[in-house]
Amino acid sequence: MMLQKIRDKAERVILGLNSGTSADGMDAALVKFRGAGIESEIELICHETFPYPDSLRLRLLKDMGPSSAGAAELCLISSYLGELFAFSAKSLCKKNSFPLEDVDAIALHGQTIYHHPVPFAFPGFPVTGTVQIGNPALVAERTGKIVVSDFRSRDMAAGGQGAPLVSYLDYVLFNNRARGRILLNIGGVANVTGVPAGATPDKVIAFDTGPGNALIDAAISHFSEGKKSFDEGGILARQGKVYDDLLGALVRHPYFQKQPPKSLDKETFGKAFFAKLIKDNPGLTSANTVATMTQFTIRTIEMGIMEFLLQKDISYEEIIVSGGGAKNETIIDSLRKNFPRLSLNSADDYPIMGRAKEAALYAFLANETIMGNPGNLPSATGAKNPVILGSITPGTAAL
Amino acid sequence: MMLQKIRDKAERVILGLNSGTSADGMDAALVKFRGAGIESEIELICHETFPYPDSLRLRLLKDMGPSSAGAAELCLISSYLGELFAFSAKSLCKKNSFPLEDVDAIALHGQTIYHHPVPFAFPGFPVTGTVQIGNPALVAERTGKIVVSDFRSRDMAAGGQGAPLVSYLDYVLFNNRARGRILLNIGGVANVTGVPAGATPDKVIAFDTGPGNALIDAAISHFSEGKKSFDEGGILARQGKVYDDLLGALVRHPYFQKQPPKSLDKETFGKAFFAKLIKDNPGLTSANTVATMTQFTIRTIEMGIMEFLLQKDISYEEIIVSGGGAKNETIIDSLRKNFPRLSLNSADDYPIMGRAKEAALYAFLANETIMGNPGNLPSATGAKNPVILGSITPGTAAL
């Protein structure tokens, strides 16, 4: 049968599909795997981004709201994204002259519209939950391929936060007998993954350190009245003076004391947080506020690394920085100054980074599921045990 | 691996889980299968209903509304039902002293909160969709069993209405070399399944004929001001005189001219339809209205059978009646009078009928999916082709 046939192959090609939290478009990546688990050999064949029209992006952002979308909207938009994902999968193959028939399976993460890792009280059972839309049955029917989907639910059913799932891929890509590596991604939120030298996967530590670019961008956008969206190179931050009292108050947020594994939603230090900060602190000026927000990001990244990664018995030699914040020289200069014994490198020098990484991640996790391996790292997600992730929808042939 | 191990067994025990459209409770059934496909031997081991508290029923009914529930509510209630389904599965085994370890797989239909088989226009792709809640990852994690779920989406992806899925089970249970059988279920909506003598599955015809008890019940409830909910034995219908003009207008509804496969949602001839009818026709009296609604049900059932089932080259010998309407003697008398050559029997004499049937149906469909067989009958659902239904979530072991 099909599943065993795919398992028996020396090489598998899996097509990963993903739509980011900002709902700006779909990513599709073709990834080749030899083997599975920590010995996986991973090769990115090709990747494309399929941007959404504004109308769809705004609709999806609205659907993520707590009470804006009913069952009808969520059902139909999930089918619609299913059609678009199938279309993107075929387009990726066509554009890159890769025959669809050589794809062994599709990994469909879909579009997250809700993620609630904190237990919510219901009678008898506290529950957590996550919803990714993009109907897998449609993708399976249109492509004829086995589809692996719903990667986060099982980790949460096992008591985990359903995130970060990327830590396992980071382990496979970056683990090294001689060099301990800290992967730092500075997106809207900033997160770190520590892969100590010669570590087994259960020694990987991953968590969100705090804000990444979100508050810096919010400050820039606020003071430029929307004309600018980010602090290019971190130049404005360098011109301002940090409001020490404000910074002191910000870093006392209880999140920073929590032990990992821990994760943030994008709301905690997002636009509404910044709007309240501006309202509560009248008279803030442009450069000083950008400087303060930049320091808030820097301090919480550095605190996270120092308190939770750099322990006596664990050795790290390198920080590899990715995300938009890697181009903010104010941030990078501080890291270089404060961690003089760690070499600071850009993720651009490594394969499968940047925009292709998420889609490649789900292809990697689907390969694990197909091969019958767990795909979560409990040390990163907080799950009680490793679990096989996802659900498998048959293609044209029997599983 | 697990899937092949289950396939290789001579007998499989599958636990079916379902929550009905009225959201009054969960049904759980243990069903034993020998073989698969049209030769399946099916034995109901046990069945239990786990009623919902009123608060949950009302919450679910509200969630079904077009705009009442957001992503957060649908996500968390899906996890909550997942916990309850897992709990019901274990309770069923415990109550009936059936060891959970002897269950090979779980079939999870969940709770339908939206079903839209009519294509809805989106840019580029018209879409249909269906959503059943009840998180399969939770059921798999709590029970350790393989879970087959989301039975309707794939049929809809293949152009079908996602319903009726029961026709295939009806075929397997009732097909007979010598006797053609018409299965008539009179619930809120009335539906028929024709299984001609010696037919192959693709000759099964199934469709909703029109209203079942819904409008009769609505009339009784209206005129008794809520004191009564149904016309016991069809007695009031017999005392009234049919409003012929009104009946004539009702049967001209375009639905009745449509060729099968066709299906109704419960709204089309539901409470709101009756309320409008009462408003548009002032002066209607109790017994006459009940008589007219009863005739509307009878006529449309009889029209459906005559126009779409009793064709020259197809032979039927028997009508088997199930559902609440089977106890309405006004309906049964009419069928007996108008189809004198067909013997009229009660479904109560057959196994796997009544409340256990839905849960047993999903167990049956899960058995087909596990065995790699399609589970839809395109002649019943309108799908372009037979498809393997559902998605499979691994249990504790690899698939």
Image (cartoon, coloured by chain):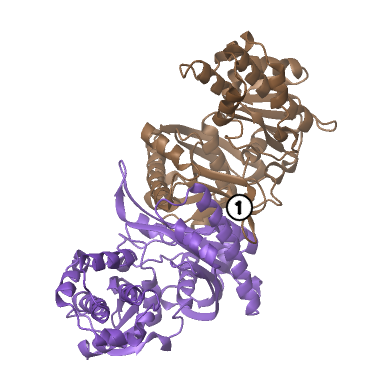
Chain colours: A brown, B purple
Between B151 and B323, which is closer to the camera in this rendering? B323
Q: Secondary structure at mark 1?
A: helix
For the N terminus of chain B, the quadrant is bottom right
Q: Residue at x 49, y 56 (%)?
A: A2
Viewport quadrant of the C terminus of chain B: bottom right
Position of B343 with respect to A269 (left or right) is left
Residue A62 visible from this viewpoint: yes
Percent position of residue A211, x then y? 63, 28
* Mark count: 1
Any part of residue A373 in sight:
no
| Residue B381, quarter of the rendered image | bottom left
User: Where residue B45 sits: x, y (%)?
Assistant: 55, 81
**Label 1: few (<14), some (14–19) or many (≥20) C-alpha neighbours in 10 Å:** many
> In the image, is A363 to the left or to the right of A161?
left
- What is the chain identity of the residue bearing mark 1? A
Q: Nearer the viewer, residue A317 or A5?
A: A317
| Residue lying farthest to the right in this orientation | A312
Residue A270 located left or right of residue B283: right
The residue that disc 1 covers is A154
Q: Is residue A233 above or below residue B206?
A: above
What amino acid does circle 1 point to?
Arg
Residue ID at (37%, 79%): B230
The percent coordinates of residue B42 (x first, y second) are 48, 79
Q: Is residue A383 left or right of residue A18?
A: right
Q: Quadrant of residue A200?
A: top right
Residue A231 spot, x, y in % from top left: 55, 16
Quarter residue B8 falls in:
bottom right
